[in-house]
Image (tube, grey):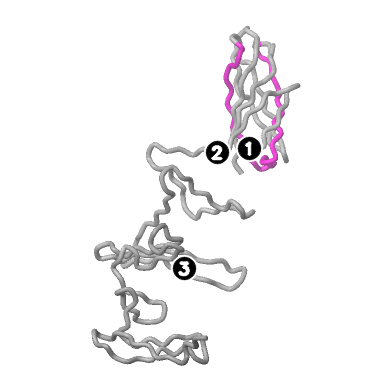
Amino acid sequence: MLYLEDYDFTILENGLNTQKNVDFSGSTSVKLPAGTQIGGSSVAALGIVTSTSANALSVGANGSTNPVLNVDASATSVATGIDVVGKAAASGVNISVISSGTNENLEIDAKGSGTITLNSTGTGNIVSGADVTPASGKRFVPDAGSATSTAHAATINKQAGQITTESLTTAAGTDYTFTLTNSLIAATSTVLASVGLGTATTGTPAVAYITPAAGSATIVIQNIASSAALNGTITINFIVFN
C-alpha cells in the first residue's frame, strides 16, 4: 500500500529543480510554494488563476473537449467577467457582471437553434426590473391554443388563442355573447380580443366589450352591419395580460 505522506515530491520553482515538500499528512490540504504553476498558469492565491488561455479553467470528463464548464480568458485586454455571490438560505444567489467600465452588457446564448428556458422547474414568477425589448425583427410569442365553441362557449387555458364559433345568424345591430373559460384569467386581468370572418360571408362582427372574471371572460360581439346578418362562423382571437 502506498502512503503519500511517506514521500516528498519535487516541484519546479522559478525554473530551478528545487526540493519542496507536498504535505498530504494530517489534513487534506496541499501546500504549494509561491511561484508554483499549474498547466503553465500561476497560482497567486487559493482559487486565483492568472491565465490568457481560451481554456483558463475547463472542467469535464474529457478535459477541454466539450467540458461541463469552460472559462475563456483569451480576449485581448480582457476586463469583464461574471461574479457569483452565495448567500444564506432563502436569500438567493446573485450573478452579476464584472467590468472595469461603468456599463457592461450580459449576453446569454444557446447553441445553434437551441432554446433558452427560464424557470422550467420552479413555480415562481420571472420578474424583470427593466423593459424587455425584442431584437429588431423579432417578436413576443405567447403560449397559444385554439378551440371551437359550442353553445356560445369554449375553453382555452393559454395566454392567447383563437376560437372558431359555431355557425351564427346574428342579425344586424344585435349581439353575440361568448364565454371564454381560461384558468389564467382573473377579475383584474386585461383581456384583448379581435374578430374576423370564418365561413361567414355577410355581416360585420366587432368586439363591443369584454368583462373578465375569475377563470373566465365574457366577450360581447356586435354585428355592426347596416342590414346583413351573419351567415356562418366567425373567429375570435384573444390575449391575456396579468
> Could you tell me which residue is drawn at 60 percent across and 9 percent down?
202
Q: Residue at x 59, y 41 (%)?
A: 241
Up the image or down, 97 lies above or below 2; here it is above
* Residue 149 x %, y %: 70, 23
The residue mark sitting in front, 2 or 3, is 3
Could you tell me residue 115's position as x and y percent? 48, 45
Residue type (three-letter) at the residue carrying disc 3: Val
Indicate the quadrant where residue 193 lies. top right
For residue 189: magenta? Answer: yes
**Which of the numbered marks, if any, corresponds to residue 158?**
1
- CA gap, disc 2 to disc 1? 8 Å
Determine crowd level at label 3: few under 14, some 14-19, many 20+ residues with C-alpha closer than 10 A: few
Q: Is 9 situated left or right of 196 in this image?
A: left
Mark 2 vs 3: CB contact within 8 A: no
In the image, residue 194 lies at what x, y percent?
Answer: 57, 26
Question: For mark 3, what is the residue?
Answer: 84
209 lies above or below 230: below
Which residues are drawn in magenta? 172-200
Amino acid type at circle 2 is Pro
**Residue 142 image label:** 2
Q: Earlier in the sequence, mark 3 or mark 1?
A: 3
> Residue at the front extreme?
1
Disc 2 is placed on an element classified as loop
- Distance from disc 2 to disc 3, alpha carbons, whole Å, reads 31 Å
Along the viewing direction, whichever of 108 and 215 lies nearer the viewer: 108
Q: Check disc 1 and report its element: helix, strand or loop.
A: loop
Vertical side of 122 occupied by 197: above or below:
above
Whether 123 is drawn above or below 19: the answer is above
Q: Is residue 147 magenta-colored?
A: no
